[in-house]
Amino acid sequence: MKNILITGGAGFIGSNLSLKLIEKGYSVTVLDNLSPQIHGDNPVETSPLYKSIKDKVKFIFGTVTSKEDWKRALDGQNVIVHYAAETGTGQSMYEIQKYVDVNINGTAILLDILANESHQIEKVIVASSRSIYGEGKYKNEEFGFVYPEHRTSAKMDNGDFEVKYSGCNKPLTLVGTDEESKIHPSSVYGITKQNQEQMIMTVCPTLGIEPVAFRYQNVYGPGQSLKNPYTGILSIFSTQIKNGNAINIFEDGKESRDFVFIDDVVDATILGIEKAESNGEIFNVGSGIATDVLTVAESLVNSYNISVPITISGNYRLGDIRHNFADLTKIKEKLGFEPKVSFEEGIYLFAKWVDSQEVESDMYERSIEELKVRGLYK
């Protein structure tokens, strides 16, 4: 069986993928820096994600911004699953150098090693993101398929949250975003994920290495970090509810995302590792269904049976998109992938797991204050 390196393998997706691969007989090495934002201040002792894998994988504490750490991790590997990245749309808009250093430069160091030094790498899977699309794909009677412009403060300040397309006088209808859709990220995070994907898909074929890119939608499920106040709407809402704090719904609550359960993401990724049909291809990974944010909040409140106020405030974050959900036609046809876990079942499983965890401190307001100071939260 092949040896697989997972960068960021102690994270939410990486740890779940590690455990499933080990079950299947693979040998897994993890390179991870155990970021306190995800794992807490004493991760070796207290991080459930790290503890779930530490005795089952070869663990290397290190960072993708270090060439020496990359070299240690690459020794003897056949496949790389590259998850290590700074994540979070809002945070990326003011920690720009950090996001570029980790996401783009870290990937560049990997490719430099693969291009100039001996190794046994046969395939690289890169975790791309739905964020590279920016706003989703729409259809209009006058123009056919269109890609709306990014929304402006001037319109959102007046409560006009829906997207517009220049010259369209008739309503836009949201459709699934396919892999051929326009790439126009609206955040630094999205830009860095676009760069990661492009570098892997461009350089690897010249080295005789098979590249695969997965554009993940909003991944959730048992085990995701409840400590990170910057990303993961289900975790953020859950921590607020468990602390008895009110939930502030941005915009009008109708903004929507594609929420895909962790088990489905792991299954899709393993298909990419194992199937030759994935070689050189880019795939969306999602549920293929758009769910609005108000529905998410109400579902979680009902699941925990804890009554907290839900306020639709009209606040918004610059860089956020309005809608996006995945067209899964390509991954279904080429890899035979079908998401198995519905949103209702996924919420039940997620909430049941959260109920078994220690209640984390609600740090969300601190993250919002950081956005306010920089003029990114209105």
Image (cartoon, rainbow, N blue to C red):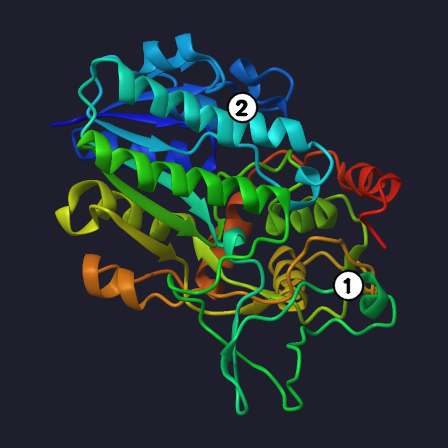
Q: Quadrant of residue 142?
A: bottom right
| Observer able to see residue 109 | yes
Quadrant (top left, top right, bottom left, bottom right) of the N terminus? top left
Dot 2 alpha-carbon crowd within 10 angstroms: few under 14, some 14 to 19, many 20 or more? many
Q: Position of residue 120 (x, y in %)?
A: 17, 20
Dot 1 alpha-carbon crowd within 10 angstroms: few under 14, some 14 to 19, many 20 or more? few
Q: Which residue is mark 2?
A: 47
Q: Position of residue 109 (x, y in %)?
A: 41, 20
Marks 1 and 2: which is nearer the front? 1
Pointers 1 and 2 in contact (C-beta within 8 Å): no
259, 134: nearer the viewer: 134
The amino acid pointed to by label 2 is Ser
209, 35: nearer the viewer: 209
Q: Quadrant of residue 8?
A: top left
307, 292: nearer the viewer: 292
Residue shown at 51%/18% (left/top)?
Answer: 33
- Asked if 298 appears above or below 117 in the picture, the reply is below
The local secondary structure at tag 2 comes to: loop
Would you say 359 lies left or right of 105 here? Answer: right
